[in-house]
Image (spheres, grey):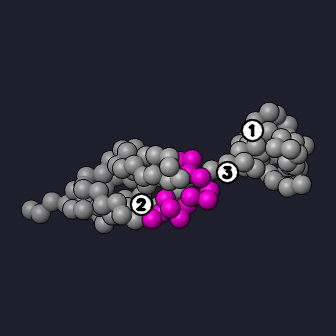
Amino acid sequence: MTRMICIVCPIGCEMEVTMEGGVVLVKGNQCPRGIDYAQAEMTDPRRTLATTVYVLGGARPLASVRVDNVPKDGMMEAMAAIRKINVPAPVIMGQAIAEIEVRGEIFPVVATSTVPGYYFV
Ligand code: SF4
């Protein structure tokens, strides 16, 4: 049995989760979304990865980025791929600046900050 707190909504139900014959059994959830969350956590946990990438010719050297739904056991692979990214300025918040491959899946790398180009006057 595994205890976990559902983080889907602010109520934060404390759940008891067991796997029996490949089936996930959940107690303590107040709605069906808790079952979906527990099932995902037990079989294919995912996380949002927030980090930075290098910006070439930008007013700042780094731009913050986000990658959603990365497999939890693929974080190191994702970081290794992101470390190789050099994006030219300008970078616009919300822009998909690159794609990375993690565990055979393709994920967009999305900028979460704006970095203007650096201009000499
Ligand atoms: S089980 Fe439902 S009510 Fe409870 S925290 Fe999760 S989403 Fe919220």
Rendered position, 117 above or below 26? below
User: For the magenta stretch, what is the residue range?
Assistant: 68-80
Name the residue at 62% across, 56% down. Answer: 72
Name the residue at 57% across, 47% down. Answer: 69
Q: What amino acid does circle 3 point to?
A: Pro
x and y percentages locating residue 80 in the rendered image: 45, 65
x and y percentages locating residue 26 in the rendered image: 87, 42
Whether the residues at callouts 2 and 3 have beta carbons within 8 Å, the answer is no
Of 119 and 32, nearer the camera is 32
- Mark 2 — residue? 82
Q: CA distance from mark 1 to mark 3?
A: 11 Å
Rendered position, 56 above or below 90? below
The total of numbered circles placed on residues is 3
Please report whichever mark, 1 or 2, sits nearer to the chain's N-terminal start.
Answer: 1
Q: CA distance from mark 1 to mark 2?
A: 29 Å
- Mark 1 — residue? 36
Whether the residues at callouts 1 and 3 have beta carbons within 8 Å, the answer is no
Which of the 4 quarters of the picture holds residue 10? top right
The secondary element bearing badge 3 is classed as loop
Determine which of the numbered discs, if any, sits on residue 45 in the image.
3
Q: What amino acid does circle 1 point to?
A: Asp
Taken as a whole, is the magenta stretch helix, strand or loop? helix
Is any atom of residue 94 visible in this view? yes
The N terminus lies in which quarter of the figure?
bottom right
